[in-house]
Image (spheres, rainbow, N blue to C red):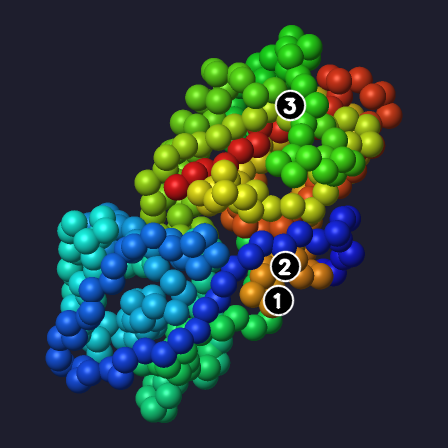
């Protein structure tokens, strides 16, 4: 599906980087990699790299996109395990400690800003050998450059029905009726006018705890659904939002600022009166593409129906919007209510 954006498209910077990599050594030989100093870098230069190892261990280091360490980590993940025998040695804590691990222990890499690996082509490496140079159905990547992204990156979402019991759902409706006076107008980080119109309740402890518990219980399923390496959740945020007649939220993402950079997954739980007292309010999740080293929204998109007592999950980096609501009565109790929030790493 293709659709013209409801607002001027937003951009999220991502430096794909490039650079050379030392020639690979013999497959059977351990390669002692040069230690990498995690000295301070400018915000424009640095990439925060979290290395995920077997056993649930993870370590972080700040380096430049051109650093050979980043390229070697990617090449190790792209290669068949049996063909790589490498010893990584990485300086941590400004040289106060050293992380050493074998290539077979590498599970995944998280980068901020995101660096993407193209995964389409014929499944051969640069030597024409099947399976050693690429993953999926993509062209193999030269070991002298970081892989680049082409085409559209398809956005995925997961919607679960009957997320709460009928009793919990009704209790929530009663709760918002009783606390209407506590809702305040929403704002955005940029402070742009006519960009977001709704009202929000920031504190509702009992239901915040309920949502957190339910989401924690399905975290393993979420990681599998979105093919994400498991991570330690530092916080599950929540706010209670009401959209009424004419209200909306234009195109945005949820982790495009320094304060929100650790948001990995966004969720939206829908609840409202039955029969449905409004129309509109669909969630539009746009596919992505990389343009001039930026994430930008593609023309294609997914339209998510705000089904009563359902919850939707998607990656926080996705561009998305809430279409305008039409609520003839304009009564608060007939709003499109959500508990929406973010899962932070």
Outermost residue toward the top in this view = 178
Residue sitting at x 26%, y 49%: 58
Q: Secondary structure at mark 2?
A: strand
Q: Are marks 2 and 1 in contact (CB under 8 Å)?
A: yes
Nearest to N terminus: mark 2 or mark 1: 1
Q: Position of residue 137 (x, y in %)?
A: 46, 77
Q: Is residue 159 visible?
A: no
Nearest to N terminus: mark 1 or mark 3: 3
Residue sitting at x 37%, y 35%: 234
As measured in the structure, the alpha-carbon distance from the residue carrying label 3 to the one carrying label 2 is 28 Å
As measured in the structure, the alpha-carbon distance from the residue carrying label 1 to the one carrying label 3 is 34 Å
As measured in the structure, the alpha-carbon distance from the residue carrying label 2 to the one carrying label 1 is 7 Å
Q: Position of residue 302 (x, y in %)?
A: 66, 53
Q: Nearer the viewer, residue 264 or 160?
A: 264
Q: Nearer the viewer, residue 308 or 321?
A: 321
Left of 49 or right of it: where is 82? left
Q: Does 34 appear above or below 59?
A: below
Nearest to N terminus: mark 3 or mark 2: 3
Q: Nearer the viewer, residue 26 or 169?
A: 26
**How many other residues sit within 10 Å of disc 3, few (<14), some (14-19) or many (≥20)?**
many
Q: Is residue 3 visible?
A: yes
The image quadrant that residue 4 belongs to is bottom right
**How many other residues sit within 10 Å of disc 2, few (<14), some (14-19) or many (≥20)?**
many
Query: What residue does disc 3 label?
Result: 200
Left of 198 or right of it: where is 271? left
Query: What residue does disc 1 label?
Result: 291
The mark found on residue 296 in the picture is 2
The image quadrant that residue 178 belongs to is top right
């Amino acid at each position: 599906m293709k659709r013209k954006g409801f607002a001027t498209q937003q951009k999220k910077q991502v430096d794909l980087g490039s650079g050379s990599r030392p020639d690979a050594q013999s497959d059977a030989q351990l390669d002692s990699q040069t230690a990498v100093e995690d000295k301070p870098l400018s915000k424009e230069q640095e990439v925060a790299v979290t290395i995920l190892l077997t056993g649930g261990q993870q370590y972080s280091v700040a380096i430049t996109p051109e650093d050979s360490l980043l390229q070697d980590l990617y090449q190790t993940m792209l290669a068949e395990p049996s063909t790589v025998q490498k010893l990584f040695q990485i300086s941590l804590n400004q040289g106060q400690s050293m992380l050493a691990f074998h290539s077979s222990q590498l599970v995944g890499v998280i980068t901020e800003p995101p660096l993407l690996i193209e995964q389409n082509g014929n499944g051969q490496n640069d030597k024409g050998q099947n399976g050693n140079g690429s993953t999926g159905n993509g062209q193999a990547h030269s070991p002298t450059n970081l892989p680049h992204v082409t085409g559209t990156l398809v956005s995925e979402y997961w919607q679960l029905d009957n997320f709460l019991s009928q009793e919990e759902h009704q209790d929530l409706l009663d709760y918002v009726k009783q606390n209407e006076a506590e809702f305040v107008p929403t704002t955005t980080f940029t402070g742009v006018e006519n960009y977001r119109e709704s009202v929000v309740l920031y504190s509702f402890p009992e239901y915040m705890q309920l949502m957190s518990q339910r989401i924690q219980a399905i975290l393993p399923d979420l990681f599998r659904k979105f093919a994400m390496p498991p991570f330690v959740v530092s916080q599950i945020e929540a706010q209670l939002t009401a959209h009424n007649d004419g209200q909306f939220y234009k195109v945005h993402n949820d982790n495009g600022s320094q304060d929100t950079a650790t948001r990995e997954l966004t969720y939206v739980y829908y609840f409202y009166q039955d029969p449905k007292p409004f129309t509109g309010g669909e969630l539009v999740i746009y596919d992505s593409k990389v343009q001039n080293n930026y994430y930008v929204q593609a023309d294609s998109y997914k339209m998510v129906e705000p089904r009563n007592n359902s919850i939707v999950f998607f990656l926080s980096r996705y561009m998305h919007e809430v279409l305008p609501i039409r609520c003839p009565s304009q009564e608060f109790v007939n709003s499109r209510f959500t508990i929406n929030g973010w899962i932070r790493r």
